[in-house]
Amino acid sequence: MLMHTLSSATLLLALSSLALGAAPTSTTHASLSSAQQLATCLKSLGSKVLTSTSSAYAKERYAFDLRYTFQPQVIVMAKTESDVQLAVTCAKASNIAVTPRSGGHSFEGYSIGGQNGSLVVDLGGFNTVKVQKNGKKAKVGAGVRLGKLYLELFNQGGWTINAGTCPSVGIGGHALGGGFGLMGRKYGLLVDRVVEMEMVNANGELLTVSATQNQDLFFALRGAGGGSYGVVTSFTILPFKPAPKVTSFTYEWKFSDYAAVLKAYIAFQSTGTRDVGLEMNVGASGLELYGIFQGTKSNQAAAVASFLKAAPKPQNADVRESRYIDALLRFAFVEGGSDSDKNINALALQSPYHSGDSHYTKGKSLIYPSALQPSTIALIGKWVAQKPKGSTANYIIVDLWRGAVQDTAVSATSFVHRNAHSVFEFVVEWDESSNAKPGKPDCQPCLQWMNNMYAEFLADFKANYSGGVRGYQNYIDMGMPNWMDAYYGQALPRLKQIKASADPTNVFRFPQSIPLK
């Protein structure tokens, strides 16, 4: 049974759109009529509606990665569910694509449409976190950034959640595409702890989506929900208490040790406890392993002893016992202010603090089903040793998965990468400025390095690993070969069926959205 609410304003707009939808006599007239119709329809939202003539449009039209300069036709700075309902209803009546924006970190600029002329629903106004008194559940607005999420959960009873470390990433895209982080091996993906969502569908209806209501959408949204089925406005999640004391750590090696270090790291996958969450960053300047252990410093030493024994001796080690929230701050890459003044409140990214991530970057991914072969490790060394002209950083991140990620059946959600052994994120950046300006020309040597490298990794993958090429949808990439299969695998036929049922006129569309057929 379809569970939803439909506001009277939405119903009136749906009916009145029939009178407004007469066929235009020319392309120019069609565009003008559509724009006028949309403006009239959205008029009641007042200053929440931004167009190219609005003073705030120039700032709000961009996402985090300033490479992308798509021009939305309209940006709706939504504050309430009814704002979202009206925006979707009006866009549908005017045949304009709708794109939700939570944090704006899409690797291909899809949070601003991925094309010109979309209606962007900005969810920054949905920024509250409310933990139930017993702590069993927390309701999170879809515009909440991960840094604020961690801080609010901590402040409301010492709770936390399993998610990524970048504080400026929004929960929306992160959760709907899976959501892996340093707690992944112990608690699985962020989406695995989502038990309910509220979503505005293509008809402007506010749905409750859970295991008992709109079950097909509950399947689709948990892994393939990033903008293809509706605008999710809230998540109900299951928080948990971290260990009273945790141990954060970094170990560093010189680049010449890369093969031996990576061999030991990959072997640790099968023996390491789930209490260890870790990530390896490989760059031309060397290798850095960082992570968090759920326990004391003495127990951390025992937990990683087998790895450190198998690997060359690190050049540097920094091991600290603290609260979990302090460990998150350590790896959050927050800039601004002074280190002596920085405390956990910096996670909320309020002035003077801001995210230190590059605003000009290109990323790709590969998911490996089994332990890395020597040829793959050799390719890592070959390509990170090359620094493209104009780049400020180029590196490969190797994440170890499995653990609790495997505890959820592959068929239970649309996230199909449950049995991944490790996941590569390939990254190149070319602007480190925190005040970067939009529209800077692409670094062509950077993109050439990425494309040439990726081609070799693809060839190596096909020669040495079973199954099809797979990628992580949260690192979405237009250049991913056979991308629908790579991201959604065996879930794709069902995802298309749900799309055709939930959004038959393809209101929610962008270049890599789930298609109708």
Image (tube, rainbow, N blue to C red):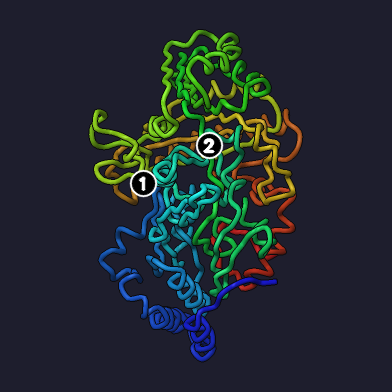
Three-letter amino acid code at the position of disc 1: Pro
Numbered marks: total:
2
Q: Nearer the viewer, residue 214 or 32?
A: 214
Looking at the rendered structure, which numbered label has been put on residue 181? 2
Q: Residue 62 appears at what percent x and percent y?
A: 37, 56
Quadrant in which the N terminus appears: bottom right
Residue ID for mark 1 = 441
Q: Is residue 23 visible?
A: no
Q: Which dot, 2 or 1, sits closer to the camera? A: 2
Above or below, 475 relative to 14: above
Q: Residues within 10 Å of mark 1 (few under 14, many from 20)?
A: few
Above or below, 266 relative to 324: above
Q: Is residue 232 visible?
A: yes
Q: Quadrant of residue 344?
A: top left
For the point 38% across and 39% down, which residue is it? 357
Relative horizontal placement of residue 345, taking residue 175 as reference (left or right): left
Relative horizontal placement of residue 232, taking residue 273 as reference (left or right): left
Callout 2 secondary element? loop
Q: Residues within 10 Å of mark 2 (few under 14, many from 20)?
A: many
Q: Residue 470 appears at what percent x and percent y?
A: 66, 41
Three-letter amino acid code at the position of disc 2: Gly
Q: Residue 293 appears at what percent x and percent y?
A: 52, 25
Callout 1 secondary element? loop
